[in-house]
Image (cartoon, rainbow, N blue to C red):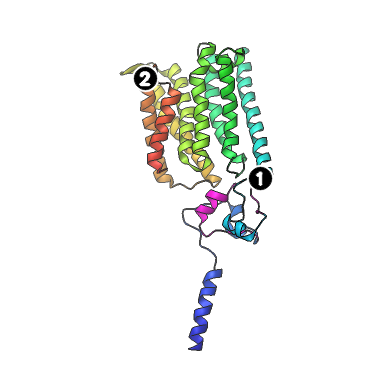
């Protein structure tokens, strides 16, 4: 009887100190696995919750304060303090400078006739959104990080409004992002483009495949479709003579590939884990629907920079369950 009582005490104790088995659908980078964390950190028993709330591959630190608060927060600061705000402010300034440099570079190349103006415009369309999204991991784990990031497209949004309403003049900006070189064009496609970037950052951020796929298809898919369609689009789509089979096919293929590439990028950094067999099929479905929407003769009513990402967000939300 005494031995049994002793065993009943020892077994729960052993179970309590046994290492937590990692969830099979959770991924953490090698340097941030729970087994490698300092003992002062309080690890949660649910790895997915731990990663979603407390993980950033570039910023983590223990929270000072009461033990209760530290236990509830898993040892990490999810609210943000002066350090994380400084990191986010620095990241915002860095990305704004990079965006300005990107536009200025292609403006310089087009002015020197080293690249066609329309090609320059489309390359800016493709690269600016993708590079903005690729910069998200340099922001902190603070709850305000997504709003700091959205300041980047918001700054460009204000710039488009100011020049679109002719309060100021910037010929380089107008040439680099408009089709016909008229200031009022800034208030249509280019403005919708940056508004989608703001929406994706604020609503979905880096924890959801939905925003990643929507931006990837709008930038990579739609941008490539115009470039390929202008050069190889001799065979037009029967229901829309403004669109070609070559352009639509390239949008579907490149939109899918760019989306998968960006999903892999964020997945490798530990923001979410995906079943890649089903993910490829879901991405292909989203890209197909976005391609069909882009091919419809509705450009005069709804700009592609609204219809394509909106369709992508709806289908991706249904496909991935977000």
How many neighbours does mark 1 have within 10 angstroms: few (below 14), some (14-19), or many (20 or more)? few
Give residue 298's mark: 2
Helix, strand or loop at label 1? It is loop
Reply yes or no: does residue 152 show up in magenta. no
Q: Nearer the viewer, residue 133 or 116?
A: 133
Residue drawn 50% across the image and 46% down it = 272
Q: Is residue 229 above or below residue 57?
A: above
Identify the residue at horizontal 45%, vertical 46% (top origin).
Answer: 274
Q: Earlier in the sequence, mark 2 or mark 1?
A: 1
The answer to whether any part of residue 135 appears in the image is no
* Span colored in magenta: 40-63
Between residues 102 and 90, which one lies in front from this camera angle? 90
Asked if residue 107 is positioned above or below residue 96 in the image, the reply reads: above
Q: Is residue 36 left or right of residue 265?
A: right
* Residue 81 disc label: 1
Vertical placement of 77 versus 234: above or below? below
User: What's the residue at 44%, 25% (across, down)?
Assistant: 306
């Amino acid at each position: 009887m005494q031995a049994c009582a002793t065993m009943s005490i020892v077994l729960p104790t052993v179970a309590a100190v046994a290492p937590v088995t990692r969830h099979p659908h959770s991924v953490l980078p090698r340097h941030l696995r729970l087994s490698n964390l300092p003992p002062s950190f309080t690890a949660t028993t649910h790895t997915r919750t731990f990663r979603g709330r407390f993980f950033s591959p570039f910023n983590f630190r223990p929270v000072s304060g009461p033990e209760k608060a530290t236990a509830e927060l898993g040892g990490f600061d999810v609210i943000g303090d002066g350090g994380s705000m400084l990191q986010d402010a620095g990241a915002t300034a860095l990305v704004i400078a990079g965006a300005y440099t990107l536009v200025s570079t292609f403006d310089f190349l087009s002015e020197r006739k080293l690249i066609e103006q329309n090609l320059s415009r489309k390359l800016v369309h493709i690269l600016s959104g993708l590079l903005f999204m690729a910069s998200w991991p340099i922001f902190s784990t603070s709850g305000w990080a997504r709003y700091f990031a959205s300041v980047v497209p918001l700054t460009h949004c204000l710039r488009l409004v100011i020049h679109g309403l002719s309060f100021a003049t910037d010929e380089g900006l107008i040439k680099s992002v408009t089709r016909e070189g008229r200031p009022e064009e800034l208030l249509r496609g280019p403005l919708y483009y940056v508004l989608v970037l703001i929406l994706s950052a604020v609503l979905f951020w880096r924890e959801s495949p939905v925003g990643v796929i929507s931006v990837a298809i709008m930038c990579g898919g739609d941008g490539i479709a115009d470039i390929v369609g202008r050069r190889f689009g001799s065979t037009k789509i029967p229901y829309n003579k403004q669109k070609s089979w070559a352009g639509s096919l390239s949008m579907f293929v490149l939109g899918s590939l760019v989306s998968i590439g960006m999903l892999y990028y964020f997945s490798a950094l530990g923001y979410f884990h995906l079943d890649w067999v089903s993910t490829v099929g879901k991405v292909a479905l989203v890209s197909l629907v976005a391609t069909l929407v882009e091919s419809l003769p509705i450009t005069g009513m709804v700009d592609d920079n609204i219809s394509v990402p909106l369709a992508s967000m709806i289908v991706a939300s249904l496909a991935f369950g977000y």
